[in-house]
Amino acid sequence: MIRHLALTLLASTALTMQAQNGPTMGWSSWNTYGVNINDALIRKQADAMVSKGLKRVGFDHINIDDGFFGGRNEETGELLIHPTRFPNGLKPVADYIHSKGLKAGIYSDAGANTCGNMYNGDVLSVNVGFYNYDQRDADFYFKECGFDFVKVDFCGGDAPQNKQHLALDPQQRYTAICNAIKNTGRDDVRLNVCRWNYPGTWVHDIAFSWRTTFDINDSWNSVKSILGENLYLSAYCYDGHFNDMDMLEVGRSLTAEEDKTHFGMWCIMNSPLLIGCDLTTIRTTALQLLRNTELIALNQDTLYQQAYPVALTNGCHVLVKDIETRNGTKRAFAIYNPNDDKRDATVSFKDICLEGNVTLRDVFQKRDLGEFTGQYEVTVPAHGTRIYVAEGEKRIERTRYEAETAYISDYQEIKNNQAERTGIYSADGACSCGFKAGWLGYSEQNDLIWRDVYSDNGGDYTMTIAFMSGENRNINVSVNGKKVKTITANSGGWGTVGRKTVDIHLEPGRNSIRLSNPSNWMPDIDYIELKNNTPTAIQAPSATQTADGIAYDLSGRLATDDSRIKIINGKKYLTR
């Protein structure tokens, strides 16, 4: 069991790294080369990024990962650079990257030793991390050398993965490193927290991006596993800070269809896009995929939304997100097939909140497909994905909000969630989209919040809560910070979905709905569903007009009685 030090720094004291544009795009040395890098290799990759047209479509970072260290002068504290791999030091190679119109990235560890020391036998990667040298190293990397990005690993802080057996607190260490970077006077450095699993909600105020899983490797099972763990993390990507699904394996040994899924899902789920193959020898099909500007546009869309799950169709996940305009009629959606056989998938446009005729564009093929009504059917190959931009005649309100699209205020994946009493998301075949949120309650922060519940005009709604529970458990329901009611979810067994309803009122625009229980466990939650009870209405005709044979007199009274006529706020409406 890893020992964790008590927190001494409050999250409110953290200096937030400035949000800058979309997820980071570029190239990183680790996936192909590990610690076996050198000055000439890095320069060649920078050259290839420009000559292969990748810079032109937005890839603008060349990131030097582990392998450049040469130890540390224990008397002066000076960080030493590997004498044969980088004989002229780091600044000349950073300058060369900048001379190409690119940004330069670097690597370190929150502890003393790096992962390359533990796992790759890199004997000079000892005592080279930020630990005990936060400000000195930050000044060196960002003031002296001019690097623009830093990936900070945690092998040196995780006791089983470093020779000193240091067990450091991630929040304390990354907060200190963030503050040291800010103290350099640079507010444009992108800090990537590489703690492998989702570290905790505090990370949003520390980093530009953060890893959510263990390292990727060049296999379909790795890509599939990472996607499975990120389907339920969309609520934690917001305000220009991003879940990092790790560096790309595109262009290595995956099949062409798997490469498409890998890159396409990283794009629509707003992960950083860091190419991991050798750019000097990249095959044509992979290069064309990476230069797909329509996929990249989904990744860099300025709403900064991660696509979230809305349906399962024959074993395929349907994910959707707004693009260009929040709550507009233009959306992007993906149909992802993780299965080992092809699947016929049907997407209901109602599930992606569009109505009327819907025009579709295939983003992989860069081709307009035409106009469709009601639904779209497609066969998705094994391990395949299809991604579309859809534009409908009308945007309709979202009615179902899956639990895996909601936010848990103290969510984390580092410590044992049961010991810490923090909620989790888990797969469950009985649930509507295959996931649920559980282990909720016992503190105010271990709640479940949908923070972007949109209502066109506001009004009264009936909310259905779908849950699983093996015993009677209470749920406090709050809307926009005000408690509405406490309801009891009756025992029905952990394999059965039960339902309870509660009446709520929403304001026009964005609302938040929160479920909590500060003193005991809540049931596991599958989803909430909203039914608008406010009549959909149109302004009544004037006294000189008729509608459906109904006339109005000048006094505002009905000349012909009709039950569809409603008086709302002193005005007459013909309801539908």
Image: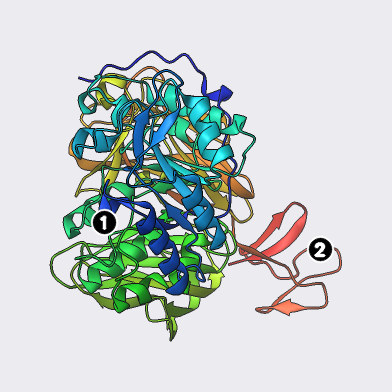
Using a 10 Å C-alpha cutoff, classify the residue at mark 1 as few (fewer than 14 neighbours), some (14 to 19) or many (20 or more).
Answer: some
Q: Nearer the viewer, residue 458 or 160?
A: 160
Q: Is residue 399 visible?
A: no
Using a 10 Å C-alpha cutoff, classify the residue at mark 2 as few (fewer than 14 neighbours), some (14 to 19) or many (20 or more).
Answer: few
Instruction: Tell me, for residue 45, which label it has, or none.
Output: none
Q: Amino acid at mark 1?
A: Thr
Instruction: Tell me, for residue 32, which label it has, or none.
Output: 1
Screen quadrant of the N terminus: top left
> Residues under labels 1 and 2: Cα distance?
77 Å
Q: Earlier in the sequence, mark 1 or mark 2?
A: 1
**For residue 497, which quarter of the picture?**
top left
Screen quadrant of the C terminus: bottom right
Instruction: Tell me, for residue 556, which label it has, or none.
Output: 2
Decide if residue 219 is on the left or right side of residue 239.
Answer: left
Q: Nearer the viewer, residue 369 or 186?
A: 186
CB under 8 Å between discs 1 and 2:
no
Q: Residue at x 47, y 56 (%)?
A: 61
Could you say where residue 253 lies in the image, as x and y percent from the top left?
19, 65
Q: Nearer the viewer, residue 255 or 85?
A: 85
Q: Nearer the viewer, residue 524 or 379?
A: 379
Q: Is residue 383 visible?
A: yes
Q: Residue at x 28, y 78 (%)?
A: 378
Q: Secondary structure at mark 2?
A: loop
Q: Amino acid at mark 2?
A: Gly
Q: How is the image coloured?
A: rainbow
